[in-house]
Image (cartoon, rainbow, N blue to C red):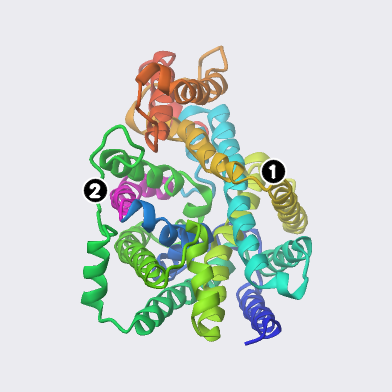
Amino acid sequence: MSTALIVSILVLYFAVLIAISLITSKNADSASFFSGNKKSSWYLVAFGMIGTSLSGVTFVSVPGGVGAGAWHYYQLVLGFFIGYFVVAYVLLPLYYKYNLTSIYRYLEIRLGFKAYQWGAGYFLLSRTLGATVRLYLVINVLQLFVLDELHFPFWATTLIIMLMIVIYTLKGGVKTIVWTDTLQTVFMLLALVVCIVSIQQTLGWDWSTIWSEMENKNMTHLWSFDPMKKDFFLKHIIGGAFITITMTGMDQEMMQKNISVKTLKDAQKNIVSFSFVLLLVNALFLFLGGILYIYAQQNGWEYAPDDVFPSIVRDHLPQGIFLIFIIGLISALFPSVDGAITALTSSFCIDILGFERKETLNEQQKTRLRKQIHIGFAVLFTLLVFYFKWKNDKSIVDLIFIIAGYTYGPLLGLFSFGILTKRSIQSLKIPIVPIVCIVSPLICYLLDRNAATLFGAYKFGNEILIINGAITFTLLYAFSKKNLTAADETSII
């Protein structure tokens, strides 16, 4: 199968997404862009969230990590599972109670305008960095395994992909994303299953033999019991739960599709059903990693972890399987990027520009301004991708993911303080929220940098997010006042 044919099929794939956009964006307005008019079907949102949660990085890196880490990643997945129930039964009721379009409005209702601004600001920062890293890594894979053979430059690939994403998200927003994410999740899961079956048939082994071989090669170990390591099971499970609570439940991108469902009960069904499906899908990715390494070892091949999956599929499986892999990779990428741009546009319009406050703006003015902001974020994404390519340093990628722990920590502290206490900070004369939101990540950074001196062999992992949130909560509590009245809570609504 020629590279030109692969590119042609990818163009057809984009055309399908654009067709969906044209259908779903008819008579679209700001309400449908930001919240889908709260008419989204819960089962479509649940299925589409699989693609949003499993980015292109997951598609490549989770199977690649099995060689060194066995199934230790699944400890984190079990933590995710626990966290989704907190999102469903603690956070979603709050968002529906106040009929929120931006979830950070809760922080204003409960803690004041500064908390609202800083919550939205941390989301804008973290989601912009995280989404562009995912975009950069997947474009790199496409460039290396497909487009370099056509002598197609990296910059052109990036521009075309960003242009396509803007075209199918610009008008419809959430209403379009719900449907495109559903389609892309289908393609991603299809690629996952087809690749597993193809390698199994190439090996000529039955499933029980493959599993036994994985066990013999220590690829199925689930638990890590060394508390000094980053993948210690309690760090992974507790950290995973809090990652879900913050990076799903306190993230506008993940929540805007959930609160686009008509009723709270349906939104909760969406989260709970999705959490069970995610257990199975992640197990399949880890099983894929095991079978990839068995296949490589049987033939004496050695690859870097992130190259195992794409290299074996491209060089040693039928070309049709490689095409399906590319479609699956693209399908894993787009839900995490198109949803991010839509959510960032929504948050900027509502939280920064105050669309819900400015009654002087008519619908036409809002639409024009929203489109300009949407395109602006697409330009920012493109520039950041070029920057990562210029740096060409994987430590940059690691740094961006670490930043998530520092940016979502204050969000965890702010939301937790609002939910778990009845204390008030709105009448304080000093700007306590900005101070706390700067000091807390700084303390965590200093702890992490000096961990060897302070704690010996101990290394911080996902618990840095929890520590960050705990420091934020403690400082807010120390400077807060008692006796929040009903009037305090409702005066801003």
Task: Give the image quarter of residue 454.
Answer: top left
Q: Toward the viewer: 406 or 74?
A: 74
Per the image, the residue denoted by label 2 is 223
Per the image, the residue denoted by label 1 is 358
Residue 55 in view in this figure: no
Residue type, mark 1 in image: Lys
Name the residue rendered at 30%, 55% in the picture: 71
Residue 220 in view in this figure: yes
Counting from the top left corner in percent of width and height, residue 282 is at: 35, 62
Counting from the top left corner in percent of width and height, residue 299 is at: 41, 73
**Disc 1 or 2, which lies upstream in sequence?**
2
- From which residue to which does the magenta span run? 71-97
Residue 88 is covered by the magenta coloring: yes
Give the quadrant of the N terminus: bottom right
Looking at the image, is 340 positioned above or below residue 313?
above
Q: Toward the viewer: 433 or 205?
A: 205
Residue 4 is covered by the magenta coloring: no
Counting from the top left corner in percent of width and height, residue 157 is at: 73, 66
